[in-house]
Amino acid sequence: MTKSRKKTIFLAAVLVVLLAASLAVDLALPSYHIAVKVIKKATVYALVAVSMNLLNGFTGLFSLGQAGFMLLGAMAYGVLTIPVASRAGVYQYFDGGLVQFSLPEIFSGFLGDTVGTTAGMLLALAVGGVLSAIVAWLIGLPVLRLKSDYLAIATLGFAEILRAFFQWNALGPITNGSNLLRGYPDFENATSYIVLAGLLIAVIVLMINSTYGRAFKAIRDDEVAAEAMGINLARHKRMAFIISSFFAGVGGGMLAMYNGTIAAASFKSSMTYEILLIVVIGGIGSISGSVIASFLYIFSSEWLLRGLDSGTFLGISAPGIFKNGFRMAVFSVIIMVIVLFFRRGLMGDKELPDLLNRRPKRSRKEAAGK
Amino acid sequence: MSQQVLNVENVTMQFGGVVAVDNLNLRIDQGEIVALIGPNGAGKTTAFNVVTGVYQPTNGRVSFLGDTIIRNHPQGKMKKLYKGEHADLYTARPDLRDPEALKELESQKDPELRAKMQAACDKALEERKARLRAQDPMAFTDKVLAPTPDRITRMGMARTFQNIRLWKSQSVFDNVLTAMHCRTAGGLVSATFRLNRREEAQQRSRVEELLKEVGLWDQRGEKADALPYGKQRRLEIARALATEPKLLLLDEPAAGMNPQETDELTAFIGEIRKKFGLTVFLIEHHMDLVMDISDRIYVLDFGKLIAEGTPAEIQNNQRVIDAYLGVAEDA
Amino acid sequence: MQELIPYLINGISVGGQYALIAIGYTLVYGILRLINFAHGDVFMVAGLVMVYSTTAMPMYLALPLVIAATVVLGFVIERAAYKPLRTAPRMSLMISAIGVSYLIQNLAFYITGGVPQPVTVPIPWISENIMVLGASTKRVTVVTPVLTIALVVILVCLIQKTKIGMAMRAAARDFETAQLMGIKINSVISMTFVIGSFLAAVGALLYFTNYPSVAITSGSMPGLKAFVAAVFGGIGSIPGAVVGAFVIGLCEELIKGLGYTTFSDAFTFALLIVVLCVKPTGLFGEKVTDKV
């Protein structure tokens, strides 16, 4: 099969170019430069969007709990990595908090500074993911039996409950209540983000293309037929939910890294909506679509369209119109246009390498005619 | 005597107050092709749905390859509502079988005599229950045996649907490949990291084999819903075969086909039976097809079995003719 | 007990306001099977319009304007964002609703500059302080439940007695058949949104009288809670939504009264999940069976 070979080569080439680009950015620009920030944030959003797509796009479970699972991951990361020395300052209202260790410090004790810190940070991210997965398993027991919109509202509710839970002062010694968590380590360069998120997304892609991914798609396309063909619905739905939550948890940890502070209050349902809309822009059921959409979205909202908020855009200076909030207003109009008129999004359910195939225009027309 | 593949005993399916299948008994032996026919709304698809686990029957037992896989009797709310066969044994109502005895019992004023009569009634009831219990020792337990459809499929029963239910957005090849998922030994981790490459390769070559068998190999890359109707039906059969069934249930496989396609399908079913050593149970309206390939035929009407036998017997059965053509009120 | 009384009174009042929003959800869900995520934001917009109009013009012009503007908004949302997706899968409709909610919030952010808009000219009479059962409160607290019940009674009459009400019931029962029977489905749906928005506007007038300011996110929480109330009472059922709203309003205020303010929102969702798992059709909902 030379065609699939061609696709693999194409995909590899795209990845190499991406990696080279981020390395170049890292070498040429200081870490506080907007380009580095955009890459970091977009990578994190790409991971989270892909994890949401796995559930909403590939398994057909309309879940809106993403922000909750991200919060879990972020909290776990913060709690486990804040250096012991700065804990007294961070947990000032809770006598320095209950947790008196920091994974990066423990590991740098016997692995050396660089390797140890990285290992500790990665482990903390993984813990966040596992925690999310466990919570997803618990939540999934009652919730996954619900159908479409009821599932959406129940998962949304769970995310809100989690948010309230983490703001509860009684848990303050661990979570710092409604105060910020800060002072934890971050990866300086964009390449680390790209490599880490890239590897995780690669795992998701591998899984989607495995026999389990096919089973998920079968459930999405026709539940009754899937069950009649021997696919255990409860088991596979739970599996998809747990996997998606794991990656959302890791993504949440990475978002915390990028932001530099963690406030439970900021993991609102509007964050889930934002990610959902990214998934829709990219195309429900397309991994590369989600990734591209994340980069486009973050790039334009953080950088390209910044002028819309600060008075001057494309050389036009109109502070009366281009004031704070205009960027997001324009953005949401664009999103609505996509939602209403380009329902398939950028990629539909195709992946990037599929673009190598000649477009079967005729069959598309036929499908539209039906 | 050849081995029994499917045995349906006293199966009643009641939805609320409506009895869709009433005390169905049928048996399918190894290698047979058995058809279930009947006018529209006779309860054929409901019977299929009971056998494949979509519905939990109100009463009765289904065994597959000698093991009981589905069992239930009226309980809970159904105890009051149940209107099927043996209602007197399961319901909370008093003995209804003998209204005169009941009347006599109720009119009896003398408590001693009344108790005696009651005891006699109870004894008769117990005797009838004992007979059922002799057939099935678990007939009156509250333990319901109702596996989900996916478990039944993994036991070796696969079906197609009356209104085609393919996975529309996926290719012909993937439709068949996905159906093999239930036979995959590899776990999530080994499948994700391609540690089960050999199993996957085997599955792919089996898909090739199957698709060539059903004549869809050339369309393997097309989306399932782009296929013409007749081919979609074939694909559904191929998909069902991919789950490695011993018993294949076909729900109106020839629906919407023209005579030529029907003939091809008839030949095709015969072929796959031979090739895969299958037993086939089918619902069909095309009488040509049914009479052509069936070894035996069961006829349902208003949920009740009204006839069974070889095609020749069924063709000449007056009750079947009446059911299909209707009987004039004044005849 | 004495210290809980103000919370109880407040609970009934908040419940009434939730009920007015919840009816909008339940009506729309009944016909379109859509969780109208934008409904809470429509409610918020009503609040904003109230703030702006009451400062700019006399009360007798401002209040009708609030109601008219909200009704128009609801109507426009339906025509622009939901009507084109009539034949699309339900997921697309829900995404569109989320998109509309996102759009309204961002537009409101742009207009307000992200600053909560203070309610400078409160509506007279209902914002005066009175004493009820020994607790000081605004008059709106007492007016709300009465007004809510009155509006619900009128609505129920409308749905039971008038022709458009009959059309709405038919559409809720079977969308396609209703269409085949010659019911102008689009005008029925528009009517549903108009009624829902009208009640949300009234709810907003009452709700924001009790609050010092209107922020762009002011609508999302009451909106979600009202939706929970609708589910709790059995989605599609108007009395159910009202009962559910009062229950939720009361519980929430009582939890606040007991000192667990952080969990007053979480409780609502916990209740939702329990209801969905135990009795998915809610208190008064009709049973729907899936056909294979």
Image (cartoon, coloured by chain):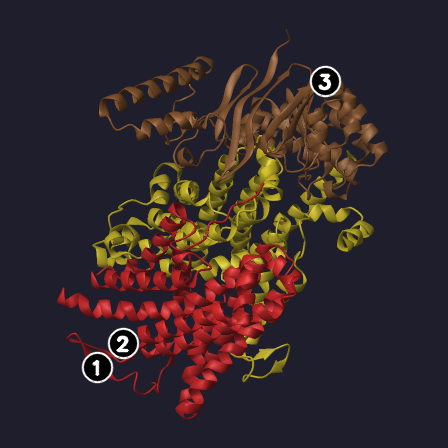
Chain colours: A yellow, B brown, C red
Tag 1 near tag 3, CB within 8 Å: no
Q: List the single residue furthest toward the top.
A: B1
Q: Give the mark nearest the N terminus, 1 or 2.
A: 1
Q: List the single residue furthest toward the bottom.
A: C58
Is residue C140 toward the left or the right of residue B186 in the image?
left
Q: Which residue is mark 3?
A: B310
Circle 1 residues within 10 Å: few <14, some 14–19, many ≥20 = some
Q: Could one spot residue A186 in this view of the protein?
A: no
Is residue C247 toward the left or the right of residue B182 in the image?
left
| Discs 2 and 3 carry the same chain letter | no
Label drawn at residue B248: none
Q: Chain of mark 3?
A: B
Tag 1's secondary structure?
strand
Is residue B232 toward the left or the right of residue A221 in the image?
right
Tag 2's secondary structure?
helix
Q: List the single residue furthest toward the right.
A: B260
Tag 1 near tag 2, CB within 8 Å: yes
Q: Quadrant of residue A316?
A: bottom right
Residue A323 image position (x, y, % from top left)? 52, 79
Label drawn at residue C142: 2
Residue A16 image position (x, y, % from top left)? 65, 46
Q: CA distance from mark 2 to mark 3?
A: 80 Å
Amino acid found under the numbered disc labelled 2: Val
Q: CA distance from mark 1 to mark 2?
A: 9 Å
Quadrant (top left/top right/bottom left/bottom right) for the N terminus of chain A: top right
Circle 3 residues within 10 Å: few <14, some 14–19, many ≥20 = some
Amino acid found under the numbered disc labelled 1: Ile
- Answer above or below: position of B87 versus A350: above
In percent of the image, x 41 and y 91: which residue is there? Answer: C60
Residue B245 image position (x, y, % from top left)? 64, 22
Q: Which residue is mark 1?
A: C130
Residue B268 image position (x, y, % from top left)? 79, 25
